[in-house]
Amino acid sequence: MIEKMKFLTITGPKSEFDRIVNVYLTKYDIHLENALAELSTVRSLRPFVEANPYRELIERSEELTNLLDPKAPTGDTIIPADKASDIINSNFLKLQDFNAKRKELFVRRDELEDLKRQIEPFRSLEFDLNKLMNFKFIKFRFGKVAHEYYNKFIKYVYDNSDTYFFECDRDREYVWGVYFAPSAEAVRIDAIYSSLHFERIFLSDSYEGTPVNAYQSILTESMKVKEALSKISAQMKQAVNENAEDILLAKRTLSLFTKNFDVRKLAAITKGKGNDEVFFILCGWIEDKYSEAFLEDMKQEKGLYCTMEEGQESPITKPPTKLKNPKLFKPFEMFLQMYGLPAYDEVDPTSFVAITYSLIFGIMFGDVGQGLVLAIGGALLYKLKKMNLAAIVAMAGVFSTLFGFVYGSIFGFEDVLTPLWLSPMANVMTVLLTAVGFGVALIIIAMIINIINGIKAKEYGKVFFDTNGIPGLVFYSAAVTCVLLASTGHTLPAAIVLVIFFGIPLLLIFFKEPLTHWVEKNPHIFPEKKGMFFVESFFELFEVLLSYVTNTISFLRVGAFALSHAAMMGVVMLLAGVKSGSPNIAVLVIGNLFVAGMEGLIVAIQVLRLEYYEMFSRFYKGTGKEFKPYK
């Protein structure tokens, strides 16, 4: 079933907005809509726009809570906003001095990382960098060059140039080093190296001693900086953890107020006549069963006004959908959510899906032993993990067990139990014909549900002229009746009866579009291109007739899988040597597990396919929107 909804509108002074949101929208399940969109015809409305005063406080509270012990207690109450603000600001002030020191240390840490990265490739150069920097007649250049160009340089240039290259390090791409040249030849030598794509690295003059000594000094200082940062972080954490519970409670309060503040995006405001007082307007949906209690609460509020209307689709929005089903059927709502929730004016097919899915699964996979395994396994998994899919498996397993007794099959043994009905492999045609008959019944039920949906939505074209409406139901039922009469040797009805039950429904389906326009009092009954209309309608009618046949035959798979299960277990029995009198137990166990797992999965998918394509496609739109209460 679908919960009945009522559309409500709340109006009150702007100054009361936060209190109303905090009190009533957290007490009742209310699905909010955009008030400006709902009341688009009212010209005096404007958006409720304000800067969020809690945003900076939330950012500060995040910084504080990141320092807290993960096991710190959390508050379960709400405190006034000003008190929460004081708690956050006072604790944030404690961190200002620490943050200033941390900032300086972070800057120094980054500087040291840059120095370390610069000097690292040149550690093999055993020469005092200070002395190197003071050379007057020799120029030097630190840098790197790609292997390709370095090899060319050594082969063609190096022996004929006035330079010395000292290799310090190399990796997969580059050779790192320093070259020296006389000051008088520096320009020419620099040009040569530049032509070889030599990339210069400018070392800072803050290094002391050899590169390796400088590198070690940098590492030592980096460790001291990291230790200082760790010490400050510990001090900050200690300072904040003293008030951990208050900080978490303040953050919880501010988070709630921030969420409440965001409700303004869905509200509208308007000014009263003759004064400057501003009023807010909120619109949304509430479940009918809570509407009276909500109105009673509103009566206690001075200056607040609340109106309610019956839940019906408006030109702007349609009521949200909240499903209400027995606990046994509730897990099957998962299949509806995968396809799309029912619209508010649709029949909720959850019960139909739960019954038909379990029933068809049992017919296709009838085995007492394997069914019990699925039922028990699914039930245990649902109890431990609360997985809807596990509950569906358990329900399917129960029906599999029941049909195992119907077929007389337990773990593949066909001669242990006496079938309550028949053994599939001994009655192939009976099983297949029964499956088709079962499919016919389901298709007819789907058509009836479609007619009910059309009546609820007041879509009379869908009821009286649709393929799955009354004409489709009459035609399909008549066709099935004639097939049954012919196959059992009975005479067919008179020609006039066939014309009524076949001709009239087909004509109604053929002229569905103009007849629907006529019923809806549309001035343009026929389309402009009448010739194209007749051609398209003819082929559409042919497709409809073909779909009746193919959809009916599609249910042969129900019987086919019942036969397939018996055949697969027959193979397992053959491999296990059951007929020899001393069966291989290991083969029997592995074979049963394999068949239960593989065939169970395939059957589950095939049943879902039948639900979606052979039944849902006839009556279900799935265009509903989920009921999402604010709280």
Image: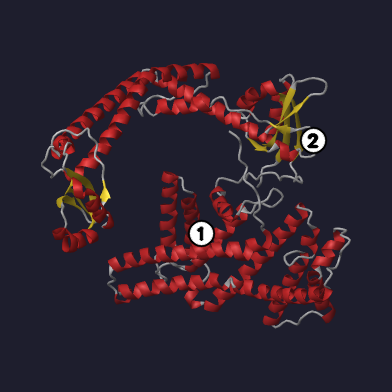
Q: Secondary structure at mark 1?
A: helix
Crowd band around label 1 with a 10 angstrom C-alpha radius: few (<14), some (14–19), many (20+): many
Asked whether 65 or 289 is in front, the reply is 65
The part of the image, by quadrant, that contains residue 454 is bottom right
Q: Are marks 1 and 2 in contact (CB under 8 Å)?
A: no
Type of the residue with mark 2:
Arg
Q: How is the image coloured?
A: secondary structure
Residue 15 visible, this angle: yes
Question: How far from the left and from the top, in percent, is residue 168?
Answer: 15, 48
Type of the residue with mark 1:
Phe
Asked whether 270 or 558 is in front, the reply is 270
Which part of the image, by quadrant, shows the C terminus? top right
Question: How far from the left and from the top, in percent, is residue 565?
Answer: 45, 70
**Pointer 1 or 2: first along the chain:** 2
- State the residue at coordinates (19%, 47%): 184
- Give the answer, above or below, for where 465 lies relative to 127: below
* Side (left or right) of 315 relative to 376: right
Q: In the displayed orientation, state which residue is furthest to the front.
A: 184
Asked whether 153 or 227 is in front, the reply is 153
The part of the image, by quadrant, that contains residue 622 is bottom right
Q: Secondary structure at mark 2?
A: loop
Residue 43: numbered disc = 2
Q: Which mark is in front, 1 or 2?
A: 2
- State the residue at coordinates (54%, 28%): 256
Residue 423 visible, this angle: no
Q: Which residue is mark 1?
A: 399
Question: How far from the left and from the top, in percent, is residue 128?
Answer: 12, 37
* Side (left or right) of 324 relative to 169: right
Residue 82: numbered disc = none
Question: How far from the left and from the top, in percent, is residue 138?
Answer: 16, 44
- State the residue at coordinates (15%, 54%): 162
